[in-house]
Image (spheres, helix red, strand yellow):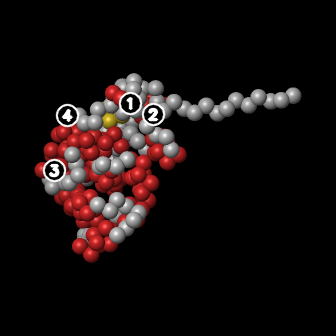
Amino acid sequence: MTRIRKAAQSPSRCAWPRTELSIRYHDEEWGVPVHDDRTLFEFLILEGAQAGLSWETILNKRENYRAAFGNFDANRVAGYDKRKLAQLLKNPGIVRNRLKIASAVQNAKALLQVQKEYGTFDRYIWQFVDGRPKINSWKSMDRLPALTAHSDAMSKALKKRGFNFVGSTICYAFMQAVGMVNDHVVTCFRYATLKNAK
């Protein structure tokens, strides 16, 4: 007698992850609230690096970025000198854009200043959503905005503090990544999982 095996059904998820790497990122990280300064700094740099490129490109280079930028230790990155920047410009494992590389160092310095004032970068950055994730309820990915009033305010404030590559669109992508907003579509299995996350 032949046994009929039921194919394991894939969970319903947002439409954008299509590769093994992006699916894993979507299922495990995207939209999960982050309160660790090192990880927040990582996403700030990676989202800035993505400008003009695909997120898949950045995900593929993520481990190289961790190695090149001292595992996103802001104290270390803030101390990078011209010689180190010249080395990074020759590193094929990261996006070799002079302005983006220089901005990582500038952003590390700006982040350290925020930590001095607020204790943590986390305490500062989460104030833009009043300390709690904003839960959206999109039925389709085409409804997702590229920026919002919250990301506008964050962008303006960060620029004033000397951060670079923090336009409103980059800030909104950052907010989505670190769980300041839950932008999983309502039919995605992660939506309900993260609905009560803090």
Task: Say which residue label 1 marks.
Answer: 141
SS assignment at label 3: helix
Comes first in the chain, label 1 or label 2:
2
Question: From what the image shows, is residue 131 above or below residue 53?
Answer: above
Say whether marks 1 and 3 touch (CB < 8 Å): no
For label 4, the residue is 149
> Rounded to the nearest whole Å, what is the CA distance between mark 4 and mark 3?
15 Å
* Observer-nearest of 181 and 47: 47
Crowd band around label 4 with a 10 angstrom C-alpha radius: few (<14), some (14–19), many (20+): few
Name the residue tied to disc 3.
Answer: 159
Q: Secondary structure at mark 1?
A: helix
Give the distance between the C-alpha atoms of the residues marked 2 and 4, in whole angstroms. Answer: 25 Å
Find residue 74 and report its image quarter.
bottom left
**Is residue 143 found left or right of 22 in the rendered image?**
left
User: Sequence-wise, which precedes: disc 2 or disc 4?
Assistant: 2
How busy is the neighbourhood of tag 3: few (under 14 within 10 Å), some, or many (20 plus)? Answer: some
Going 41% across and 52% down the picture, which residue do you hit?
57
Q: What is the spatial separation of the Cα atoms under label 1 and label 2, in whole angstroms?
A: 7 Å
- Amino acid type, mark 1: Met
User: Residue at coordinates 76% horizontally, 28% vertically from top-left?
Assistant: 4
What residue type is disc 3 on? Lys
Task: Give the CA distance from mark 3 to mark 2.
Answer: 32 Å
What is the CA distance from the residue labelled 1 to the residue labelled 4?
Answer: 19 Å
Q: What amino acid is found at the position of numbered circle 2 in the picture?
A: Ala
Instruction: State which tag comes first along the sequence, 1 or 3.
Output: 1
